[in-house]
Image: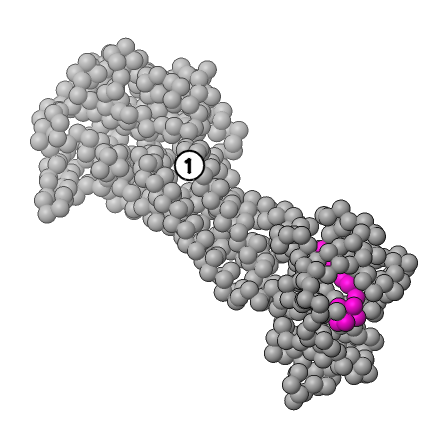
Amino acid sequence: MSALVDLRNVSKTYVRGVQKVEVLHGIDMEIRAGDFVALMGPSGSGKTTLLNLIGGLDAPTGGSISVGGQRIDQLSESALARWRAAHVGFVFQFYNLLSTLAARRNVELPLLLTRLSGTQRRQRAQIALQLVGLADRAAHKPGELSGGQQQRVAIARAIVSDPTLLVCDEPTGDLDRHSAEDVLRLLQQLNRDHGKTIIMVTHDPKAAEFARRIVHLDKGVLVDDIKRPAA
Amino acid sequence: MKYLQLVLAALLRRKTRTLFTLLSVVAAFLLFSLLDSVRSAFAGAGSSVAGLNRLVTISKISFTVQLPKSLLGRIQAVPGVADAAYANWFGGIYQDPKNFFANEAVAGNFLDLYPEFEMPAAQRTAFRNTRTGAVVGEQLAQRFNWKIGDKLPLQATIFPQKDGSNTWTFDLVGIYHIADPKQQARENLLLFNWDYFDEARALGNGSIGWYVVKVADPATADRVAQAVDALSLNSDHETKTQSERAFQLAFASQFGDIGLIVGAIMAAVFFTLILLTGNTMAQAVRERIPELAILKTIGFSNGSVLGLLLAEALLLLLLGGCVGLLLAGLVAQALQKTTGFTLQPIVSSPAVWARSLALMTLIGVLVGALPAYRGLRLRIVDALAGR
């Protein structure tokens, strides 16, 4: 497998008022296509910042980030938005679904940015919902779904445009153990059966066990990188 | 169109708030349409009489200044004048001041100049031959359930009788009908004989309020108007000859500078609307920061988010504004039917629509601009982190 994500000497500094906070220090990391990486570490270790940089949600202060051979740290804001739409799917702790839209409409959102017709968008959204086991809840609004179901809708939204990379920030952080395992198994299935490269930030060692590789960060530096046998 | 669902979803997020905001927009544009129609009517009532076949001559000083009746013969002799008549505002009250309607003392040939006042020949003759005779429009007759032969007592507010009485009693001898719906407001009028009025009134004898001049050829209306006014040039009763519409509006403008009043009200209405809608939009966007961050996360550009937020404000304004204008059309029709004035009914003209649409767009952009700018400037990582 070739390196899909390539980080070289990446640093990130935030400025809060007059104070400068250096969150990441010279990170070097490669993530191969088809990998399932868990980013772990204590609060403030920089794992979410690193995830945001890989997902193109933020720009590094120094170093370079290449995804699929493209230097995303050099892209303009609008080019980065287009790149995210085409290559990255996002899953967050709090699902972040639009409360006024039914599940299928939420899943369709990324497809609004494509040239697909309304019928094609609906078909693809339905397939994505089928994949996460929620085809029968397509017409339900987020408020009518459980937390686990909402997160699965969020995963369907993340995969509907068939992105290369899935970035997940604490995807099970707001779920009970049973729902969390369902979601993790779903991610594992997407990685194993559909070849999706997944980078997941988690606090939970049990969640990390679903990944093939566990990377530990502490105080903005990589401290450990464990490759695990496929589950 | 594919983004419409997003715009609608955002507006329907808080249905009650959106409904009340929409209602305030409806109310503002209902008012605007009606008031702008009035303002346009006054602004457009210029002095041009070109192409008209009926003119009105009043005192150059003011509508309320009387003219000598003796001008009639001289006006009738002006080349191009087919006929002329005169009238005088009476201002009588029927039973209660709330029952207001226009009532005028008119010359015997007055109705000859108003062929649109349709009335059986026998009733016309009766009006000419009955000293205390009066005619009313169908709407007015229906309003008070009057029938021919009824005695109509009016209380004078300006002209007492020579015997000191303020009660003038008229015999209803005719009821006229106007076929043109646009003119039907003039069915709310009572006309009675000027001769009777002049004989019996205690003051102002021999004077009249205004002349109505029928022009033989509308193409010569301008020249005829100038010639009529030339009759009184440098006298103590100089005249101004104008269109009937300008005359009617001048009558209404006795109450004040209509343009200024209407302008001030409209400014206040829209200032309030901008504050109210702007605040609502700002609040709506503040509540949806995480949702906007998600849209940006999945690839919506800054421009798309800006466009969505502006579209929300515009849709709200256009929807509410158009409903307001349509309602104004209905209100204008109702006013036309019920008003006692012979003022032309106010209508939602294409010009009012054009101005309203421009205003809706302008206000939509104004109230949407700040929230949209906030959406544009939104940093995804900060918004997702709740900062």
Give x and y (percent) for residue B159.
67, 67
Visual colour scheme: one colour
Query: Which residue position holds label 1?
Result: B17
Residue B172, placed above or below residue B299: below
Q: Nearer the viewer, residue A225 or A104?
A: A104
Q: Which residues are magenta?
A: B185-199
Q: Is residue B373 left or right of residue B256?
A: left
The answer to which of A206 and B17 lies nearer the viewer is: B17
**Residue B59 rendering spot, x and y as whole percentages:** 65, 77
**What subunit carries mark 1?**
B
Residue B111 in the image: state x and y as whole percent.
Answer: 81, 65
Q: Residue at x 61, y 78 (%)?
A: B61
- Check disc 1: other Cα within 10 Å, few if <14, some if 14-19, many if 20+: some
Residue A159 visible? The answer is no
Residue, far front: B163
Q: Where's the C terminus of chain B, which quadrant?
A: top left
The quadrant holding residue A107 is top left
Magenta region includes residue B266: no
Displayed quadrant of residue A56:
top left
Is B191 included in the stretch rendered in magenta?
Answer: yes
Residue at image position (22%, 28%) is A31
Q: Main secondary structure of the magenta part?
A: helix
Q: Residue at x 10, y 40 (%)?
A: A21
Q: Position of residue A12 (x, y in %)?
A: 15, 40
Q: Is residue B337 visible?
A: yes
SS at circle 1? helix
Q: Residue sitting at 64 percent across and 63 percent down?
A: B157
Q: Amino acid at mark 1?
A: Arg
Seen from the viewer's position, the closer of residues B61 and B23 is B61
Q: Is residue B193 above or below residue B207?
A: above
